[in-house]
Amino acid sequence: MTQDQPQIPRRDPATMMRLSRLGSLHQCRLSFMRILLRRIARENWQVSRPIFDIDRNGVGRAVYTAKGPERAYSLVVFAHDLPDEKRSDRVIADAWDATFTLFDGVPAEADLERLAKNVPLQEAGRISRQELSLSRANRSVRLWTHVVDRLASGQQPDLQQIEAVGYLMRTTAVYGSGKFGAADRDVIADREEMQVPFQAEMLSVYLTRTFVRDLVNHMAGNLGGTQAVRLDPAIARRLGIGNSTGLGMAPFIVNHPILFNNWMMVREEAISRVRAVARAAPEDAETFRQLVKQSVVSAKRWRSGHPVQLKKLAQLKTDLETLSQHLGNWDAKASYPWNTLIEWSETSLSEEGQELVASLILEPYGALVDGLASCMADSNADAFRIDGSLTVSAVRDLLQESFGWAQALDWNDPANCARAWYVSEEKLEPRMGERFEEPIADYEQPLAPARDAAAAVCALDAWDPKDTIARFLLNHPEHRHTVRRAQMARVAPYGEIRDNTISASVMPVDMLRAKLSFFGATHFDPRSDRWVRICMYAGAPYPEDLTPDNADLWVYPEAGT
């Protein structure tokens, strides 16, 4: 950075960690799906289908193997004939159209026999440390039937119906990191291709999408015989994998402050680096302008029936119109044009529009920001250890930094503590209930860090500021988790949500969207304030077509396609 170049800081955590802002994040270059596909293309991974033993009714098994430079990973698929009345997106479902596991290596027949007894059972079965993920998916019935029938009759499916849904199957869970016997994160964390978070899960979904395309072609061929046609590759590209995600994902960003901080800090560092670019090359400015046009197409295809999302989507479309008009006067040749554009967006666009612009400015600058992906994992094992030598005063200052706003709230007001997070006995999944209407307070999980921080500060006020926090915690062990979080904030300024997670007005879908945006999800469609449908990999090349030239900007739809 030259001497006269401005130091452009990362955006303030007090601004970025509000729930409304987190609920407006969009995918970007540093989303996990895009990081994975860039690697697969760059390293020329080979994807094969050694087994596809599926009958005319869509029942059987298949294996898809992705071989990288050093090792292979195999998606093991079990396809089922599921009656319509058993098809459910709810976590309490016990049967699905297809079930999957990502196997570490290439499975032998004995492995497949073991997995056949467990994977279709999902939570009721058990997998081993040889498996990296466990997942399941259901058909989008109307679109599935339409596509199979049209292909069987020798016709391509109707594009309007393809656009209205966007996927032929949707997953209802993709489990990993030790759940149900799968390998712990530590087993794969040191592998270069798995260093970035959730790469195993993203690979599982990518291979699942390929299986779904193959299955629909297979079933149409069996139904239509010689008159059947295969799904047009251009239409297949438009189809992603849907996902239904509920409250099980929401506590993640509360329970993993260091990890989520790293995601946010990397994104903010990337934005800061681009804002500090003194001059935009003409081709970079043109890339940005083109992606704005493609984002207009994406917004038009975004469907939702939820009133909150409809309002946000309408605002985003207005923002894109405003941005498009502004670009007519934007001088990309001026000094620090990206910084000027971000500053303009902060006063001219909604949070949805601001965060889209922040994502889009990264796209021309892969060489500047892509390397930051290696900083997104949490390798700071020492951060969990409480430093008992810190003074009461020092810990109080740390709490003030992250939770000063929370001390102004009246925690005796029922509206500020109306909700409580707990774990369901049946499925061991996070739930959120009404504190004053349901008997759940005794089972509450520590997912209200703001309230707990305010209580800890009150307790600390009664102690000598020079006392050690170790002495305080000997007398008040109930505040250990809050003190730990306060100390983590020294290395994780983006680790804390700056909003009340148990208020009467909290929208858990904001937490879901924040996490899913880092996955690379698009077209968020909340079905309530507690669960959301999304689409993954729509527009992405299939393995046989993936190259370094098309491995990245596929997420932005071409106008007219």
Image (tube, rainbow, N blue to C red):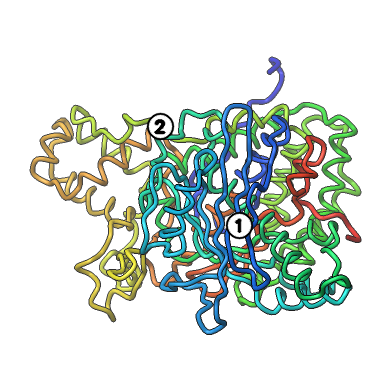
Q: Which kind of residue does numbered mark 2 sit on?
A: Val
At x 33%, y 76%, the residue is 434
Q: Residues within 10 Å of mark 2 (few under 14, many from 20)?
A: some
For the residue labelled by badge 1, is the local secondary structure a helix, a strand or a loop?
Answer: loop
> Residue at (42%, 53%) from the top-left corner?
114
Q: Is 274 situated above or below 12?
A: above
**On-image quarter of the C terminus:** bottom right
In the displayed structure, 548 sits above or below 135; it is above
Indicate the position of residue 50 as horizontal and vertical percent values.
65, 47
Answer above or below: position of 507 versus 335. Answer: below
Q: Position of residue 76 (x, y in %)?
A: 55, 52
Nearer to the camera, 446 or 1:
446
Residue that label 1 marks: 24
Q: CA distance from mark 1 to mark 2?
A: 25 Å
- Of residue 262 and residue 230, the one placed in the foreground of this image is 230
Q: Is 320 on the left-hand or right-hand side of 128? A: right
Which residue is farthest bottom?
Answer: 85
Q: Which sits earlier in the primary sequence, circle 1 or circle 2?
A: 1
Q: Residue furthest top?
A: 3
Residue 373: x, y in percent? Answer: 59, 33
Q: Residue at x 50, y 54 (%)?
A: 18
Of 260 and 242, the residue lying toward us:
242
Amino acid residing under circle 1 = Ser
Q: Quadrant of residue 489?
A: top left
Quadrant for residue 315, please give it: bottom right
Q: Badge 2 is on which residue?
A: 491
Dot 2: what SS?
loop
